[in-house]
Amino acid sequence: MLTLIPLPAFEDNYIWVWHDGRHAVAVDPGDPAPLVAFLDAHRLGLSAVLITHHHRDHTGGVTYLRQRYNCAVYAPDNPRIPAVTHILHGGDALDIPEPGLHFDVLATPGHTLDHLSYVGEGCLFCGDTLFGCGCGKLFEGSPAMMAASLDAILALPEATRVCCAHEYTLSNIDFAKTIDGGNPALLERERVDRDLRAHGRPTLPSTLALEKATNPFLRFHDPDMTAFAAHYLNRPRPGAAEVFGAIRAAKDAWDG
Ligand SMILES: [Zn+2]
């Protein structure tokens, strides 16, 4: 049986780990220490590492893990990512025989230009593209690029479990309420997620259905968000990418 676990790392990262009791696969191990402790405690080998993008808090453990476990390292085509054994592009697929896992690779640029997401086993590993009730900052890409990436995510089945690389959900909900405070699904999510965090539990994985209902960054086709953006930009009838850009700009201003 396959088990999926979010391992906390640094302040608020999650390293997602699949295992079958013998072999494990880890997504974005920025820090090797919590992963090695987990693998040791459960007597697991590490078959493979999947990397979503080049930021150090996602890649910092790769060199050590590759040396220690001789694991495969799947990553986007970026020389800043060390110890890569398999370079991937959007549209690729990968099979990891131990444990038996299959992933489709989705190009999701916007947060960074190299960003990939992995879709498989009913889950989406979206790195810093999508967060619980939020999305990644646009460090390298444009709003139109990120909106296209989020459209690709919107096309996935609603039951897809959304496995983000950071626990940012509560502060994202605080922002979402400033532009979408009348959304009952958002207020219900806040109640549930505050309770989870109060008990030290992750708010993730969420589901794509929940994100579609509550995450303003997935609702840039929605009339309410379009009205918000028209007001924010002081311009009638903004297009979907402009709506997304306005929400992102409002969040960046709110972050300060
Ligand atoms: Zn990042």
Image (cartoon, helix red, strand yellow):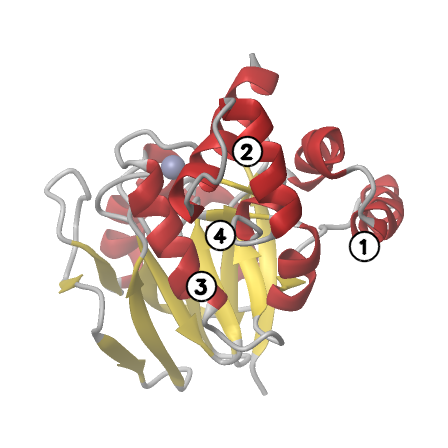
Label 4: element kind: helix
Amino acid type for the residue under numbered disc 2: Ala
- Disc nearer the start of the sequence (4/1): 4
Q: Nearer the viewer, mark 4 or mark 2?
A: 2
- Asked if 55 appears above or below 67 in the picture, the reply is above
Amino acid type for the residue under numbered disc 1: Ala
Label 3: element kind: helix
- Disc nearer the start of the sequence (3/1): 3
Question: How many angstroms separate mark 4 from mark 2 (CA)?
Answer: 42 Å
* Tag 2 and tag 1, C-beta contact below 8 Å: no
- Disc nearer the start of the sequence (3/2): 3
Instruction: Determine the image quadrant of residue 61.
Output: top left
Residue highlighted by disc 3: 153
Amino acid type for the residue under numbered disc 3: Ile
* Tag 4 and tag 1, C-beta contact below 8 Å: no
Residue highlighted by disc 1: 185
- Disc nearer the start of the sequence (3/4): 4
Label 1: element kind: helix
Instruction: Determine the image quadrant of residue 139.
Output: top left
Residue highlighted by disc 2: 229
Q: Nearer the viewer, mark 3 or mark 2?
A: 2
Assess disc 3: are there few (<14), some (14-19) or many (≥20) residues with their C-alpha within 10 Å of its C-alpha. many
Assess disc 4: are there few (<14), some (14-19) or many (≥20) residues with their C-alpha within 10 Å of its C-alpha. many
